Structure formats: structure tokens, C-alpha cells
Image (cartoon, coloured by chain):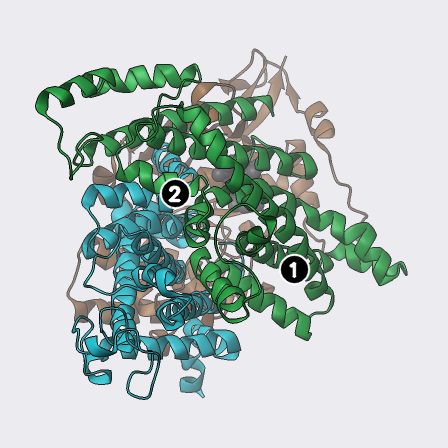
Chain colours: A cyan, B green, C brown
Amino acid sequence: MENQYKIRSPFFYAVMRLISNRAALVSGVLLFLIVLMAIFAPLITTTSYEEQKFLMNSLAFPSQAHWFGIDDLGRDLFSRIIYGARVSLTIGFAAAVCSVFIGLPLGALSGFYGGKVDWIIMRIIEVFSVVPPLIAALLLAALVDGGFFSIIFIAGIFGWVQVCLLVRAQVMAFKEKEFIRSSLALGASPMYVIFVHLIPNSISPIIVGFVQAIPLAMMLEAGLSFLGVGIQPPLPSWGQMINLGINFMFFYWHMALFPTLALAITVLVTTLFGDGLRDALDPTLKGKS
Amino acid sequence: MIRYIINRLLSIVFTFFFISILVFILMHAIPGGPFDPVDMPLSDSAKAKILKQYGLDQPLYVQYFKYMWGVLQFDFGIPYQSPGETVLELIGRAWVPSLILGGSGVLIGAPIGIALGLIAAIKRNSIIDYITSAISTLGLTVPVFVISMLLILLFSVWLEWLPASGWGEPKKWILPITAYAAIPMATYARYTRSAILDTLNKPFVTVLRAKGLSERKILFRHVIKNSAIPLVTVFLPMFIGTATGSIFVEAMFRVPGLGAYFVSSIENKDYPLEMSLLLMITVMFCFAYFIADLIYALLNPRIRLGDKKKQ
Amino acid sequence: MNKVLELKNVSKIYSETKNITNFLSKNEDNFVAVDNVSFSLESKKVLGLVGESGSGKSTCALMAMKLLDITEGEIFVNNNNITNLNLQELKKYRKEMQIVFQDSYSSLDPMMTISKIIIEPFIIHKLHSTNERNEIAIDLLEKVGLNKTYTNRYPHELSGGERQRVSIARALALKPSILVADEPTSALDVCVKAQVINLLQDLQDEMGLSILFISHELNVLRSLADNITVMYRGRVVEEAPTEQIFANPIHPYTKSLLDAIPKLDPSLRKRRTFIDDNYIQSNIPIFNLNDVKFVSKDHSDIGFVEVDNNHFVEAKVT
Ligand SMILES: Nc1ncnc2c1ncn2[C@@H]1O[C@H](COP(=O)(O)OP(=O)(O)OP(=O)(O)O)[C@@H](O)[C@H]1O
Ligand SMILES: [Mg+2]
């Protein structure tokens, strides 16, 4: 009896809510599969993404041997899509980590200290909200000259705002709570309170902010690569492949269709899973972000 | 209220100058200059002459203040890529197709979205509800160039119903407008649905039901009025958002609009055009949010701007 | 008498300095929550602080604990002025005084187990080894009438009374000499309320605590408090030994509080009359200058006067 009772932590209910949300569950499973494919790409396809092994059959349509066909340079499109998942997911994930690293401390400080600290951070966020991320990213990408890590960095710069706002709201809601005051009354320093009480209590918004930052970063990367300032060849990126596909779409539709679908499905699935996670972790956050 | 307006205006001015400085620094930090063509390098003396002509030989801060002084008098300079006209003329010319396509997209997408959201909210958990939420999720998550690509593949490549690219005859406008319409439609479908459901759950609706009012009257007389506020406020920002969308839509459909200039001005270091485009977008967004907040306050008697204690 | 905690002419003004508006213009919405309040807690005594909701009791408690900025006035702990100490300097006084809040649920971090909550004081002050900490935690739990089966539970798995006991255990972990109890029993039912009050009384005897006990009901204080301070609208209006308050209330507000206590004898029960501000303002006690003398005064004729031995009241003197 005692034990059964203990298992039902808030986390238990969150998991239950997530499982009962069919859309989130299905997207979660799909996302998991995509992640597996990206991790085990070399096991799934034997040809690498840059080998021009099939030059003779350039632009061949999908077939049994080449599920997604062959591109203009004689590369297996399926391999390129799978490795593209690697690039896209890695960038999404790494950028989300960056976003949390920037947004979490700023949100916590802003929420805890309020006043001038808050004012300054909110003005910075305001600046970010009126500049379209894509256009600013274009400028930055030109500055740092594309490339994998630059894109992660750029996406992180634009992803932290949401994390910061979520954490700030949570910290503001909690800082007047008595357990924070009790801790301060015991002699705890503000840093102790922030790290031991406020951040662990913000874990739900942090997770939500993290997961929601992933598709945003993936879209930003795809957009920049589409415009030619993102991931540089030969590294495959879906955005880049879509742009290339435009030139071929009337005759070799597979060049355009598969990268488009891959990007659409991955972004969709990640977003749906993020939304489900948000609703599961904190039903009161629903629709607020 | 007046204090609030003054505050917001001050804050917009602050943001404007902050961004102008930031963009200016970033712009000049990008290696290379506007007159370093790769294929045909200019002689040193010719380059010096042309730099002098455009004032690019002066220290950066002088260039910045000169440019901003011009901006304050509505002189945005001359674009390097097409020196025959002013930046304002170029933007005015290129904006026409973008505005026609983007504007029609929003004007068509928004009402459809509202209608879908309304039906979805009334017929909850019906097929229409599910379709609506599928559409709105797709439109809200998937980048606009992906939607454009799918539209082209479907309607031009396979069905061969519509032309995929170009500008001119209205037939060519249909697909780009549809692509533009996706985001407003999705946004409005979702907002409307949740706003109506929210309102339907309010106690005052229960009171109206208890008074014996028919569902139809409740919906049309009371609920829609009370749900309209959030719908009005997202309109302007969304409208301006089409400017960013134009970068992709116009690249996909090969429309000679404003979109391409965002990219080319950065690529070619066309400083005056680059600066003007960014400042323009920023100011429009600032005002869009500002006006949205004002409308929100005017429509919602419960909110008094200036004492946002709860925020 | 030895004063362990003293508030001297303390005021608190809540003002909104949140947005840019207030950086630019100085007309803020100020709200005086506590207005020139002085009282003191004597060693090993219980001082009851009573007043209606919103009268500024919690604000006083938070200021006494230095958990809130003090607009004006001074706070003394064991005769040391702690008003302007920084966090580092305060740390030593933190061990001396602790606070228990009304809302037992929000007093405990929902993400921590009970044992973690109770050993938090030792972690903050870097005391004892991990093993010792756990042993002490169990000791403390037993002291407040719980046992070690509670250690791995989370706050939401406890009842309100149990949670309040945990709060008390945590507050007493550092063996403070002063305890501020801000309505610790208001959210509890009558039976549990009595248990918690008894617990506090036992602990007081055992540990030699001085307690500032805040309540909005006078009857709770009758058995517990040695002295009572009555607050009304951010001001102290009457102060006296407990029996003196019950036997001879002078200020109209104190009288109305006494009136609010349910009577045992049915024949004494009558329809309650709620006294409004106007009534209190216009019925402020008036004394002759020859009978009493001011202890302090704000205006020319209104101030704090001693009407009896240790019985003070805010009054008008003519
Ligand atoms: N952070 C704050 N900002 C502005 N006003 C506040 C703040 N906290 C408290 N107040 C106001 O100060 C007054 C005194 O509040 P306080 O919490 O001290 O009352 P209290 O006597 O403890 O009441 P209760 O018995 O309900 O606990 C109240 O009118 C309250 O509205
Ligand atoms: Mg209180």
C-alpha cells in the first residue's frame, strides 16, 4: 500500500497524460525512429552521402535498389536523406542545448531579481521579438560564413528567448512562495535558492522550452541552407536539397519530394511531441507559449 | 493610458536605434566590401574613387551618423545594385508583387481559418475538428517553402493544373497566394477554436443557457463577440510576417518581389538597401505589436494599460 | 527584561517600481502596509500579534526576519542592530531566529523529500556529516510527533497538520532562540490546531524559545501568549499582558476582536455587530493629559499612552 502510493509522483501523472495523448504518443514514437535512423545511419545504408557511386544512373527514379532514387551527381538520395536527418537533428538538439544554456540563467536572474535586471533582459527580448529571426540569421550567417557550428550558434541565439520567458514566468511565480522565504530565512544565498529550489522547480518549463527549441532550430537551419548560407556541401542538409530540387522538380520530382517530406515530417513530429510534453508536464501552461 | 503610449513610443525609438547600430556593425563586420567583385577586380585607384563617391572611405561612425541623419529625413540612400533609383523607389517597386501576393494570402487565409476554427469549436471531436487541427498544425509547424514545394509538386508537376512560376497573369498568382495563406489560415483556425472553446466554458455562458437562450443566439450574440479580441490582435503582426515569408515564397515561385532583395543585399554588401530593409521590418513589427496591444486594450474593458501588475 | 527581538519605529511602503514608467516619473502607487510600528519580544516569552487580515502582521514578521526590505526603522536581535547587515553578516543571526508560515504546502519545496527538507539548514550552514544529518532529521521528526517513515515522502503526500510539523522541525533544526510563527494554525482544523499549539508550547518549554505568534483570532492566543500586541491598519493600537487585554480592552478595535470570540454561554450570545472604520476612528479613546503620559506620539494629540502598568494604547490626549 505504502509503496504503491509512493510511485505516484507528479512525474507519474505527467507520463500518464503523455501516453493518453494519442497525437503526442504517435509523434514521439516516430521521432524516436527518426533519431534511431540518424544514429545508426551507417548501418541502414551502406553508401555514404557523398560517394558518387552511381554516376551512370544519375537522376534515376526511385527503384528497389535506390528507394528514393539517385541525384544529379550520382549519389543515392536515400543515404543523403538519412544523413540529412543526422545533420538536422544534431543541429536541432545542439541549438536547443545552447538555448537552454543562455535562456535558463537569464530567465532565472530576471525572474528572481526583477527590477533593473529584469528590465534590461526584457528589453533585449523585445529587440529579438521585432527582428525576424531568419533575416537576422542571414546577416549572422554571412558574417560567420555558414558552417555546422555557426548554424548551431545562430539557432541558439534565437532559441533562448522562449526558454528565458518560460523560466522567468515560473521563477516569478515561485519566488514569493514560502519555501523560498524559508530557505532565505535559514541563511541561504540567492544563488543557492536559484540552483537548489527555483531551477529544479522550473524543470517542466525547461524541458518544454528545450523540446520546442528543437524544431525551431531545424527550421532555421533548413531555411538558411535553402538560401545557400547554411550547411555547405558536401554535408547534406534537407534545406539545401530542397533548393536543388527546385531545378529538377518538373522532370525529376524525386529530387524535390523526398527532402521536402523528410523535413516536413520531422519538424511536424517534433513539434507535436513538444506540445504533448508541454500539456503533460504542466496542464496550466497549455496554449500560453 | 497616455503615459503608456509615450512609454511604448520611447521604447520603439530605443529599439530602433539599438537595432540600427547593431545591424550597421554586423553589416560592416562581414568580410569584403560592395566593390570587390571576384571575377573582375577593380584597380586600386578606381576602387578608391568609387569608395569616395559613396562615402565609404570615411570612418564608420561618420558613415553611420550620416546615414541615420538621412533616414530621419526619409532619405534612405541609393542601392549599389541599381544606382539608377533610390532605395525607396526600389522598395516601392519591388514591394508591389510581394504585397499583392502576401496581402491576398492573409486576406483569404484569415477568413477561411476563422470559419474552420468556428466549425471545429462547435462540432468538437468531429471529423471537421480533426481535419482542422491537422491543417493548422501543418501550417504552423512546416516551413513555408516546404508547403510551397508540396503545392508545386501536386498542382503543377503531377496534376498540371497551374503554372508553378513567374509573375504576370493572375493564373500564376494562385499557388503563391495559397502558400502565403497557409500561415494565417492555420493561425486563425487554431486561435478561433481555442478562443471560442474558452468562452463557451465561461460562467456567463452557463448563465445564458440557464436563462433559456438558444445555442445559436448564445454563439452569435455573445460568444463570438467575446472571442474576437485575440483574433484582431494577431492580424497586423501576421500581415507583416509575410515580408519574411516572401523570401522563400518568391524564391520558390520565381516572383520578382522584395524577398530576393533581403538575400541579395546581404550577399552584395549593398549597405543602404540592407539597412533600409531591416529598419523597415523592425519598425513595422514594433508598430504592429504596439497597435495590437492598443486594440487589445480598447476592446477589452478589463485591461487598463500601464498597470500590468500581473505580468 | 531581556529583549531578544525588537522592532523600532518600523514602516513598510510597498511601491511599484517595476517598469520603465517608474524610472521616468516618480509618481508611484505607494501603499503603506506598516506604519511606524514598535514592539519587542522578551526572552522565553510568547508575544501574540493579532489583527485583521491585511493589517500588516505578515509584513512585520517578514521584516523582522529581514526577508523584506525595510522602508524605515530598525530591527534588533539580542540588542544588535541587524537592519543594515548584508547577507553574509546576517547568516550568523539566521541561526538565532526562524519562521513558520501559515501555508504549510507552499512552505515546503514540492520537489524535495521530507528528509531533504529537514536537513536543508545543515546544508546551508555546512554543519554535520551526511550520516549525522540523517540521524538528526529523524530525531527532529520524532520531536514534532512524526516518525522516520515520513523521510522519503514528498510534501504533497502529507496532511496539512503533518506538513506544518515538518515546517516546525525544519525551523528548529538549527536550535534557534527565536521563532516567528505566522498564523501556523489558521489553515488547520480545530483538533489539529490544538495539537500544533500544544507542540509549540512543549517545544518552547523544552528549548527555551521566545515566540512571536501571529494570529487573527484572539482566543488562540489566550492560553499561549504572555503579551499581546494588537495591530490595525498597519499600526499598533494596543499592547498589554494577555489577561489585561481580555479583562480590560480599551481600544475600540480590540473590543471588536474580543467581541468576535464565540461565547460559551448561550445567553451571552448576541448578533455580531461589525464595526466599521468610521466607528473606530470616531471612538478613539480619549484621555486627560493629567492621567496619562505619551510614550510616543505622531501628531500633536494622538499617540501611544501607558494607561496601566505595561498596558499601552493608541489614544487622543487632551
Ligand atoms: N508584495 C506586496 N505588494 C504590495 N502590497 C502588498 C504586498 N504584500 C502585502 N501587501 C499589502 O500589505 C498589506 C498587509 O499585508 P500582510 O500580508 O502583512 O497582512 P496580514 O496582516 O498578514 O494579513 P493576513 O492575516 O491575511 O495574513 C495588505 O493590504 C496587502 O495587500
Ligand atoms: Mg499574513
Left or right of A234? Residue C137 is right
Which is more toward the observer, C268 or C261? C261
Residue type at tag 1: Arg
| Foreground pick, A163 / C226 | A163
Badge 2 and badge 1 both on one subunit: yes
Q: Is residue C35 visible?
A: yes
Secondary element under disc 2, as helix, strand or loop, is helix
Q: Secondary structure at mark 1?
A: helix
In the picture, residue C189 is in which quadrant?
Answer: bottom right
Whole-percent x and y of residue B142? 45, 61
**Residue sitting farthest toward the right:** B212
Crowding at label 1, few (<14), some or many (≥20) Cα neighbours within 10 Å? many
Which residue is pictured at 28% across the width and 45% down the height?
Answer: A190
**Residue at 32% of width from left, 88% of height from top?**
A64
- From what the image shows, is residue B73 above or below residue A52? above
Query: Is residue C303 shown left or right of residue A265?
Result: right
Q: Classify residue B119 as left or right of residue C49.
A: right
Q: Residue C251, how many percent across, how many down?
A: 64, 31
Q: Residues within 10 Å of mark 2 (few under 14, many from 20)?
A: some
The residue labelled by disc 1 is B193
| Coordinates of residue A66 in the picture (x, y in percent) | 29, 83
- In this view, the residue in front, C171 or A167, is A167
Residue B146 percent coordinates (x, y): 43, 61
**For the N terminus of chain B, which image quadrant?**
top right
Marker disc for residue B260: 2
Question: The numbered mark 1 sits on a residue in which chain?
Answer: B
Chain letter belonging to callout 2: B
Who's the residue at 52% across and 60% down the image?
B139
Q: Is residue C308 visible?
A: no
